[in-house]
Every structure is written in structure tokens, then in C-alpha cells.
Amino acid sequence: MDLFWQVAAWQQNKDDKGRRSPEPAPIKRNYASRIGAGYGRLLAAFGAGLISLLIVLPAFASRNLIQDLIFIFYMLALAQYWNLLAGYAGLVSVGQQAFVGLGAYLLFALTIFTGMDPILAIILAGAFAGLCAVPTAFVVFRLRGAYFAIGTWVVAEVYRLVFAQFKSLGGGTGTSLPPSVTNSVFGIEWVRTAFDVRTPAARDIITYWIALALVAGTVFAVYWILRSRRGLALAAIRDSEVAAESVGVDNFRTKFWVYVFAAIGTGMVGALIYLQKARVSPDAAFSVLDWTAYVVFIVVIGGIGTIEGPIIGVIIFYLMQTYLSSYGTWYLILLGALAIVIMLFAPKGIWGYISDRWGLVLFPVRRTLTVTTLGEAPKTGARPPSLIDALRRDV
């Protein structure tokens, strides 16, 4: 409107000879996107203190607590990877158990047949899962929506049937890690001496540290990705693939790399899970209930599309499993009922409700549009933030 009034004044501004004054220079505005402020320094300090405490926790914690924390860590890592796919890229996968199983079986193959240290095998298991995700992506990316979800499930079932044919790894009944493998984890002798514990407890402590490193690295990596241009491109694809492509986003390439990245992380977590369990079978390693359905539950009740949501969700899931699993089928009924209630009354999840109600954000990744007029101070929210405007600027 300010430009309209300037043009109107120019049309009325004539000298005595009837000639118009020179055309006024148009108002110049600069548009830029910025990431909303959170509690950056405070969160970083709290996170560093919490991780330091968790590192030294085995020195005075019981073995049961260590095992419970291992479960929380690897479920949280799985939830963050699934949330990255579904919550930010719009790739609702029901077949992430495929990469859990691939990581688990490669761990067993490398440690049993080559004598490789389990810690190195975990890293290679993630690389193997990422390698398998490449042809998988070319297959499932031809599908959209519900067909994509079903397609990922079918691919996971194919992997399960394939690994059930390997007789050297137990076939359909599975196999166990020999003591020569579980007792040869790097650093286990040092842990036994330093903490004065037996070998099984020392193995749990090393597994705990690996799980802590994986979950901390996962949260940091996801946060870094979402604050980058790739994260902006992911959000654009989730909202509208057509609009994202119109501003230069390569939809296939962006979805491809995030799918492979999630597969690598999920494969490493799967290898860690079955290093702790020390026994693998096709039905367990490729279980849709244990490694996808529960993960979806965690993300949905916590808050899909947020980093904080899976943290809340995994705590609730752990408490329910600890205190309600003894009720048998009622436990599953209660899980389903809670998910339905949350979806009806808090569609964005528990953390989404908290964030909308009180404006609390611990991991800020949402962008807002900043409008700057030449000669004026920046104005935030001069018009509703547009993801397309931000993409034109940043991608």
C-alpha cells in the first residue's frame, strides 16, 4: 500500500507546464529466513553436563539401570531416524526393521566368520545397511503415500525371507554369538579392572557407552541437518513436492540421501541391539512390531516433526512397558488407546501441545521470514512466513 500512495502522489505532482516529476525509485525490500531462537547456550551447557554424567554413571549405577538405559538409548535413536524420514521428509516407512535386521546379521557374520571386533563390526554393519538402502530406494521411491509405506514393509519381508535361507547363520531359527566374541569386545578387560565387575557386566557397560555415543550423535546429526539447507529442502518436500521442485529442490536426490542416511544409522543401532542380545533370528531381527510399530508409537505420542517429541515419547513408552507389560494383551490395548487419545486431543503430540501452548522450543529448527526495507530496521512477521520465499533465498 505504501508504494500505491507514492505512485498516486507522483501522478498528481505536476509543474506549471503540465509535465510530471521524475518517477520515484521503487521501495526495495530484502527477504531473508532466520531460525527462531531457542535456548541454545543453556541447552548446550545442560546437554554437555548430562552427557558427562551419563558417561560416568556406570561407576555407581546398578546393572539393571544400565540395561534399561541401553534400551532407552537405542529406541530413541531408532525413533529419531524414523522421525527424520516421516516427520521432515514425508517418507512414512513401515519397513525400517529391514535395516535393523541387516545390521544385526552383518554383525553376526563379521564377528563369527572373520573374528572382527564387534565395535568395528557395528560401523561396517551401518555401512552395509546404507549400501542395501540404495537399490531399495530405487524400488520404493516409485511409490507414493500409503503405497510407499506398504512397499517398504514388503521389502523388509523380502530381506527376512532371504536371511532365513542362510544356514550358516542359523536359517529360520537363528544363531547365537559365541562367548569368544562377546568376551572379546575392545576394552572389556580394562572395564573389568577399572569397575571391578565380571565379564557380562563389563560387556553391558561397553554396550551402554556405545549406545550413548550413538544416540547423542544421532540427535546432534538430525539437529544439524534440520538447521541446514538440506533440512529446509526436506520440509519443502514434505509440504509440497511440486512447489519444492519449482524453486530448484531436487526431490529425488534429497529423499534419496536422507533415506540412505537413516538406513546407515538404523543399521548401526540394529547391530548394537543384537550385540547386547547375543542372539539373532529372522523373525526377531525383522520384526515390524518391535522395530517399527513401537517406534511409530513413540514418535506419534511424543510429537512427530520435532526433535523433542521422540524424547518424550520414549520415556512414556519405557514407563508403560516397565509397569504394564505384565498385563499381557491389555498392555497392547493400553498402548493403542493412549495413541488414539493423543491423536484426537493433541494431533501434534505431547510436545507439540506443550510448544503451542507455552511457546517452548529446545531445538529450534523452524524458520521465519524477515522483511527488511531499505533504510528501516528489520521487520519480522511483516507478512506470514512463506517456505517458498525461504527456499528461493536459501536453496
Image: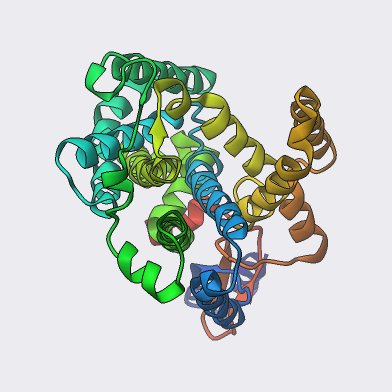
Q: Is residue 37 left or right of residue 141?
A: right
Q: Is residue 330 left or right of residue 390?
A: right
x, y (%) of residue 345?
85, 40
Q: Is residue 145 left or right of residue 198?
A: right
Question: Which quadrant would the N terminus be assigned to in this image?
Answer: bottom right
Instruction: Give 343 or 255, whichever is nearer the viewer.
Output: 343
Residue 27 visible to an observer of this rendering: no
Could you tell me which residue is drawn at 28 percent across and 49 percent down?
118
Instruction: Give 392 or 61, whichever is nearer the viewer.
Output: 61
x, y (%) of residue 206?
40, 61
x, y (%) of residue 255?
37, 39
Question: Which quadrant would the C terminus be assigned to in this image?
Answer: bottom left
- 286 versus 269 height, above or below: above
Q: Is residue 214 left or right of residue 353?
A: left
Instruction: Give 57 or 216, whichever is nearer the viewer.
Output: 57
Choose top left, top right, bottom left or bottom right for residue 246: top left
Could you tell me which residue is drawn at 54 percent across and 86 percent down?
375
